Image (cartoon, rainbow, N blue to C red):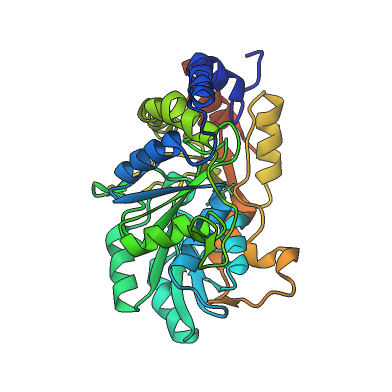
Amino acid sequence: MTSSVLTNDFVKLWNQIASAAHEALERVGQSGQVILGNEVASFEREIAQRTSRLHGIGVANGLEAIEIALVAAGLKPGDGVITTPMSAFATTLAIVRAQGVPIFVDVDKEGLLDLSLVPVAVGSHPHARFIVPVHLYGFPLNLADLKEVCLRHKLVCVEDCAQALGATWNDEVVGSVGCSAALSFYPTKNLGALGDAGAIVTSDHRMNECIRSLRDYGQTGKYKHDLLGYNSRLDEVHAAILLTALLPSLDKWTGRRREIAHAYLSGIQNHHIRIPTPPRESNPVWHLFPVLVHQPLRDEFRSFLSQRNIMTGVHYPFLACDQPAMRDIRFGTVGSLTNARRFAAEQVSLPIHPFLTDEEIEHVVTEVNSWNPVQGS
Ligand SMILES: *Cc1c(COP(=O)(O)O)cnc(C)c1O
């Protein structure tokens, strides 16, 4: 194998979408409308439909999608927001920027927020009013349990679906359970734009109006500002490219990710490596393919693969609550976050982007199976 097996391949992507992307750009130019035009409106309808929602609202990125969704859901400064410390830092950053107080709960054996600990979090943090669960790696949380725990503890739920558009639990799609859900179209995501983009979906009409106003300086009519809002609009050009160059291939790309995941799940056999396997009710979209390698062998495993031209990632090496940026920020924790710390120390992401060739997939399986840390690399 001469060329590297990459974790993402943006050039292959471009070569597949170039002519459709040029067409989309031309359409926007000819329309004379470059902000909040028909392309954004059409893309919003598609995204709402794919998450079984009545409304989709395009915003500038996933971070602001979470922040604006929380503000629109009525978060007040000091409200507790239950979440996971094992996620992109943006999840926590959005909560802090919205002036919520993150309450970090440990993760389960797949690395997802452990819903069975939510009652403990509510018991020890009476100001907890919100929950931001993350469908990490493209694995859906148990949506039935999520709904139940929110109902029982009167928690307002904003789902972080940045990694999981299209993932289902018992045929119910992620993003359809909370009062709203946040999506990111950051280039590495399963539906990745040619730049930054995001969206919020909801079925609540009032929340829809509020989010539309918040993303556009808090305007409720021309030059009339009822709210202190943001400039967080989704660009018309990005919406046009997402709509006709990227979205039509999403199902095909997700199908390919599932094929690769299947090949890894059935092909990888190495007792030094544990693969978190999602339960049967879950149909993940495999944003990432996480494996766990016992501490302190992770670096050795990664450099072994890198020497064989296989790139890997770590998602994520630090917990949100341990980040230096959180030093002077108020937050709560439940228990000692043992599982989350194990993920931070042991997780490795194998390549799983949809443009991997069969040969590359086989190469990954063969090399992962041949790794034997006892003999060294
Ligand atoms: C990418 C990501 C975000 C942030 O999205 P941006 O568009 O990069 O701002 C938030 N949460 C999770 C889980 C993510 O993976």
Does 61 appear above or below 131?
A: above
> For this rendering, which residue is in front, 140 or 151?
151
Residue 227: % across, % down: 53, 67
Residue 61: % across, % down: 56, 47
The answer to whether residue 145 of the structure is visible from this angle is: yes
Quarter occupied by the C terminus: top right
> For this rendering, which residue is in front, 147 or 75?
75
| Left or right of 317 in this view: 17 | left
| Left or right of 97 in this view: 158 | left
> For this rendering, which residue is in front, 160 or 40?
40
Residue at (43%, 68%) from the top-left corner?
Answer: 73
Residue at (47%, 36%) from the top-left corner?
Answer: 190
Residue at (50%, 72%) from the top-left corner?
Answer: 81
The answer to whether residue 359 of the structure is visible from this angle is: no
Residue at (66%, 57%) from the top-left corner?
Answer: 318
Q: Quadrant of residue 50?
A: top left
Residue 3: % across, % down: 66, 16
Does 92 appear above or below 301?
A: below
Quarter occupied by the N terminus: top right
Residue 70: % across, % down: 48, 66
